[in-house]
Image (cartoon, rainbow, N blue to C red):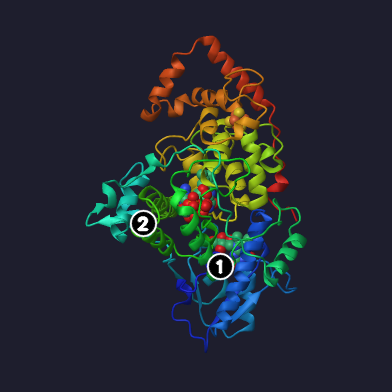
Amino acid sequence: MGDQLSHNVSSLNGFDSAHDTVLMCEVRSEATSVKHHKKKIAFLFSAMRHFAAELEDKGFTVRYIQYDDPDNGGSFLSEIKRAVEALPIEKIVVTQPSEYRVQKSVKSWETQLGIPVEIRPDDRFLCPEETFRDWAEGRKNLRMEFFYRNMRRKYGILMEGDQPVGGKWNYDADNRKPPKSGLQIPPPFMVKPDAITVNVMALVARAFPSHFGTLDSFHFAVTRDQALKVLDHFVTYRLPVFGDYQDAMIEGEPWMYHSHLSFYLNCGLLEPLECVRAAENAYHSGHAPLNAAEGFIRQIIGWREYVRGIYALKMPGYVTENFLEAKRPLPDFYWTAETSMNCLKQCVVETRDNAYAHHIQRLMVLGNFALLAGIHPDHVNAWFLIVYADAFEWVELPNVSGMVLFADGGYLASKPYAAGGAYINRMSNYCKSCRYKVKEKSGEDACPFNYLYWDFLARNRDKIGNNHRLGMIYRSYDKMSPERKREIQTDSEKFLDHLKPAASEWVKDDA
Ligand code: FAD
Ligand code: DLZ
Ligand code: SF4
């Protein structure tokens, strides 16, 4: 499958090139389960085609079905059926798909085809599903920090005996520097599209014209060798500053000091442990400071594995969670970028152009607005699953429903990540060129985040009013005069009532 492009993926263990065939297929059902960003489809199809060619070079027999093959039936099952008819197949071997939707379908193959199907665990994750389940058992709420410490111990990463290197597990407090002017941000590592990628881009332009996003300036790595170069480039040029500016946002600087490795980790071109060891080595050799190496490593062995564990544990019910009973449809500007709120505009434009936005843009701008405005989790999840080239439901859903929307009632995160305009102003330069005034609290010109923040807290008090991490904030709200509270409510209602809902064509293919 398109996110199993690893030469050591479990389905290939024991592959016998004299008898076995690898089946790979570009199928409509996957490309349009939601209407993925054009760059995401081009990236995955090109990476799949390159991977198939590498396997053939190694002597594997590969049955590769291209998207516009006239006989392509359009789904995994149709293509397996065709393979079963064409070849003397005794058994199907598959690595467990990452998404629940596909897992469910694979489980029905044996009955549908009348052939044994062996589903092997995906051992590219560092924490097996059962280990996570054992750790989570009996806990009402989970906390990433404790899970992360176990992972550090288990893999001996940044450890001195049984103690963390430097004496602390977590250096996040050093990683919140606001952006300063004059930062020399290195350009991202760019791969020039080769003939395969150019071909795929033409196919995507032709076959998916109504999908979100542009194909211009496609520069993703599409092979393991290229992805290793992206890793090396990150460690050499960005990692030393990664920690300091991890939360910073600058207009016109979509890539900042982030690694841009999620695309390759999630589709299998890179392995999590090799990225982590590269950062650890950079620390030990004196190339990168501890706050940078630890911060980066925590994202991968901590957050990435943690959200995957929660997904495995909580599906299928996690999809329908809506603890705050949010109902509003997604505003149109998430697709068109037509909004006067400059922070949102910048983040949507960059998402459209790059199929990428870095974590704080996703969490504190795009996500924060969706939380404060009370957008329905289905709409927010669909958007995040569509627009990013690294988005697969196992990682997107816990981040959106758990981290951003508090839709799971606090299972993943201890409090909603809600913030007013002051946070965005501190961590970015977006407010300087915004039509709204970040310092104003009410009225036509006030930054909408400012009143929406308090309105969100007031609206949801029955659900989150007892959260001990919000106690101080609610006390500040209680000290406000009745007039001020009314003003917050009126400004918010007026603003929210004027939001134009998005058209549904962006999400689902009607054809
Ligand atoms: P870096 O900042 O360089 O981080 C290094 C690596 O750590 C990433 O490549 C990624 O593999 C991992 N990582 C960091 N944060 C997280 C996290 N919260 N959860 C899981 N892994 C993490 N990440 C995805 O891979 N796919 C998604 O669909 C996705 N959707 C998100 C939606 C929202 C609302 C939010 C708040 C976060 C989402 N993330 C998602 C997590 C994170 O934003 C991206 O992994 C990151 O921005 C990718 O860019 P990068 O490779 O430059 O990351
Ligand atoms: C995301 C995606 C897309 C757009 N297209 C394909 C495809 O044509 N063929 C394929 O094998 N995989 C694709 N993928 C990735 C799958 O959606 C992903 O492997 C499953 O959702 C994992 O459960
Ligand atoms: Fe965003 Fe408010 Fe700043 Fe405008 S003023 S950029 S809306 S935070």
Which mark, by number, is residue 445?
none
Task: Determine contact: label 1, label 2, CB under 8 Å.
Answer: no
Q: Residue at point 52% right, 89% down?
A: 18
- Return the disc, 1 or 2, that comes first in the chain's sequence: 1
Q: Is residue 438 left or right of residue 142?
A: right
State whether residue 395 appears in this view. Answer: no
The residue that disc 2 covers is: 286
The correct choice, above or below, for 419 with respect to 153 in the image is: above
Q: Secondary structure at mark 1?
A: helix
Circle 2 residues within 10 Å: few <14, some 14–19, many ≥20:
few
- The residue lying toward the viewer, choosing from 417 and 458, is 417
| Amino acid beneath label 1 | Gln
Q: Quadrant of ligand 3?
A: top right
Q: Residue at x 49, y 46 (%)?
A: 399
Determine which residue is flagged by label 1: 226
Q: Position of residue 215 (x, y in %)?
A: 71, 57
Q: How many discs mark residues in the rendered view?
A: 2
- Amino acid marked by disc 2: Gly
| 359 sits left or right of 273 in the view | right
Residue 378, compared with residue 437, is above or below; it is below
Q: Is ligand 1 less than 8 Å from the beta carbon at label 2?
A: no
In this view of the protein, can residue 20 be seen by the observer? yes
Q: Quadrant of residue 488?
A: top right
Of residues 249 and 381, which is closer to you in this image?
A: 249
Q: Secondary structure at mark 2?
A: loop
- Quarter of the image with the C terminus in it: bottom right
